[in-house]
Image (cartoon, rainbow, N blue to C red):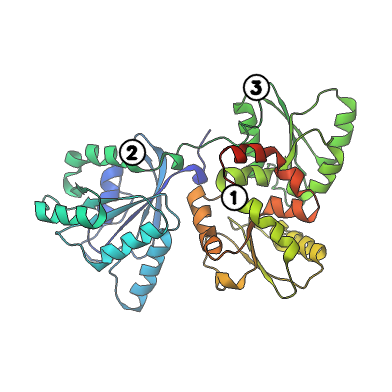
Amino acid sequence: MTKGKDHKPHIGIFGRRNYGKSSIINAITGQDVAIISEIAGTTTDPVKKSVEIEGIGPAVIIDTAGIDDVGDLGELRVKKTLAVIRQVDFAILVITNQTFTRFEQDLINNFNEYDLPYLILYNKSDLKPPDESFREEIRRITNRELLEYSAVNAEKYNAGFLKTLRSEIPKSSYKHTGLIGDLVTPGDIVLLITPIDIEAPEGRLILPQVQVIRDVLDNDCTAIVLKEREVDDFLRKNPVKPSLVITDSQVFLKADASIPRDIPLTSFSIVLARQKGDFASYIKGTPAIGKLKDGDRVLLLESCSHHVSCDDIGRVKIPRWISNFSGKKIEYDTLAGLDNLPRPISDYSLVIQCGGCMITHKQLKNRLKDAINHDIPVSNYGMAIAYVHGIFNRAVEPFLGILNKHDEII
């Protein structure tokens, strides 16, 4: 499968100003993709560059501002640098000149808080290599070996650096599991219900639908794609029985009425949530919709910025369905992309995340981390819609046996 930006591993490079972070990016990619200068603080904002890394494939490298930046603007840049930690799959901490103080320790503390794997790259080794006492200090503090490097003599170090990077970056960041392979067997028929409405992009399908179609084919199954109003006629006229039906969440109720109970039914959003999100937490948290009270606040998280229609799923339909279902006066906030929350997470009684087709698994996991740490229930667009329509149990049933085998539901 061709990797979209959500499938590329994200690698962040962190360290102080003028430590050669941008030069390292140019050296390991063999391209002038980052601006370099003798002036400290040339990189003022996180800069993303798509590159090809041998043995890993397409990746996104994020060059960050120096962690030791100063002044009012410097503080803002440092905040942006720290925010990158929640967005990457792997970190490279650049040090040099045998210097390791609170700046580096604070970064490592942040890496550990978000379970972010990292390596320590000692740059400018050609000018002042690390002595054994400094190496031992790094081992004692971080339980990691120091990896020497020189951006001006990269050919000497690149092979060892790339070997270490390939061995330590999580394979899950660039080798992805399928969507429905454990739900079907070769030769099965999978029916996909895809409405073409005001929210459907002109001339194409939305990304989760495209991903599922590809995954059906990758598993040697047959994909039948229908609009919701064609389902009843298709089932009546054709003797074939689908092994699985996946619907757009917005027509869950219609699909539930049309698809016989002995045929498993779920949604694109739920399928994607199992690959990308905290699936067990979604299943546990979704019933909190039935416990909402007057004055409670719900946060809806979108993974991308998009044109908002008059009947937008996250900003209009889900709030309307939840309010009608609960009969309560509920406040709603919607946040797009990876922006900061509009208010403290503790202000919310429920967080509902979209499928996450435009962000990485790590980004989505970190996005929900604060809510889960504060014991705030989390749900998913598809599960929330199924719950308010009374078909939650049916929508998640295809996955429960698989989850239980791995003890993922507590």
Dividing the picture into quarters, in which one does residue 40 lie? bottom left
Q: Is residue 383 visible?
A: yes
- Report whether 166 appears left or right of 312: left
* Camera-side mark, 1 or 3: 1
The spot of residue 380 in percent (x, y) is 65, 53
Mark 1 or mark 3: name the one nearer the start of the chain: 3
Is residue 300 positioned above or below 161 on the image?
Answer: below
Name the residue carrying label 1: 410
Name the residue carrying label 3: 186
Measure the C-alpha gap from mark 2 to mark 1.
34 Å
Q: Crowdedness of circle 1 by 10 Å Cα count: few (<14), some, many (20+)?
A: few
Residue at x 39% of width, y 64% of height = 82
Residue at x 17% of width, y 57% of height = 137
Mark 2 or mark 3: name the one nearer the start of the chain: 2
Dividing the picture into quarters, in which one does residue 69 lie? bottom left
Residues under numbered marks 2 and 3 in contact, where contact means CB atoms less than 8 Å apart: no
Three-letter code, disc 2: Arg
- Report whether 406 appears left or right of 201: left
Name the residue carrying label 2: 166
- Report whether 128 appears left or right of 284: left
Q: Is residue 342 visible?
A: no
The spot of residue 237 in percent (x, y) is 89, 26
Q: Crowdedness of circle 3 by 10 Å Cα count: few (<14), some, many (20+)?
A: few
Near-viewer residue (129 or 350): 350
What secondary structure is marked by label 2? helix
Three-letter code, disc 3: Pro
What secondary structure is marked by label 1? loop
The spot of residue 153 in percent (x, y) is 16, 44
Measure the C-alpha gap from mark 1 to mark 3.
32 Å
